[in-house]
Structures are given as C-alpha cells and as structure tokens.
Image (cartoon, grey):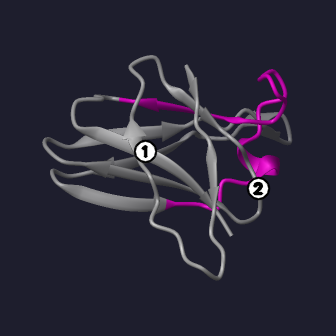
Amino acid sequence: MAALATQVINRAGLTPSLTAAAGGGDTMATGETTFLVVKTAGTGATVTIATPGKVEGQAIDDVAVVLSATTEKWVGPITRSFFGDPATTPSYRANITYSSVTTVTVGVVSL
C-alpha cells in the first residue's frame, strides 16, 4: 500500500497531481475537508474506501465508487470519524482498494 500525499488548495489555486493507483491499494489522510480524486483513462473500475467503524455493534458498509471508462470523480469528504482506521500508521488513515489499477490515477486534495 502506498501512502498518498495530501495536496492543499489555496488562494493561488491547485492543479491536482495524480499518481498511479497501487495494485495492493493505497492509504490517505482523513479530514473534514479532505477528498479523494480518482480518474480512469481507459476501462472502468470500482474504488472501495473501507469503513472500519461500527454503529450499535453493526459494521458500516464500505463505500464503493463506480467509474465508467474515461471518468474523473471527486469523493468525500473522507472524514476520520467514518473512514479513519486506528490500525494504520500514522493512525486514522483511510484504506482504499481498486478492482483494477490499469489506467487509474488518484490524488488527495484538502481545502
């Protein structure tokens, strides 16, 4: 798993830099204004963001985002309370997996 770096939007503007999705998945920082950017340049893919928490003892379903061919989506916010995994290092990063990484690029953006 690769740890994706967070890019911060400021008044000067930001053109997000995207990197190839890792075959074993990626992790990202969580926060109230933190988003995952996913883009596919070829065939589609499903991106799954794990939700390690529980509500009244019941597991919360993971969030699955379906991308068709040549699509870009911004997903979030990816909050610590919903997606943060206390077992990650550093703590409370979100775990992301992909059904396919061919032509999939990702980035993390925060306000």
- Residue 10 location (% of width, % of height): 66, 75
Q: Which residue is mark 1?
A: 106
Label 1 or label 2, whichever lies nearer to me, is 1
Look at label 2 and name its amino acid. Answer: Gly
Query: In this rendering, would 45 be left or right of 62?
Result: left
Assess whether mark 2 and mark 1 are in contact (beta carbons under 8 angstroms): no
Q: Is residue 94 magenta?
A: yes
Q: Badge 1: few (under 14), some or many (20 or more) residues near its Cα, within 10 Å?
A: many
Residue 69 belongs to magenta span: no
Q: Residue 50's x, y, as percent?
A: 60, 35
Of residues 68 and 14, the one nearer the viewer is 14
Q: Residues within 10 Å of mark 2 (few under 14, many from 20)?
A: many
Q: Return the mark for residue 31.
A: 2
- Quadrant where the N terminus sits is top right
Q: Where residue 86 sits in the image (x, y, percent)?
A: 84, 28
Residue 9 locus on image (x, y percent):
62, 70
Give the residues in magenta. 75-98
- Of label 1 and label 2, which has the lower sequence position? 2
Q: Is residue 43 above or below residue 76?
A: above
Residue found 81% across the figure and 21% down from its top: 87
3D distance between C-alphas at marks 1 and 2: 17 Å
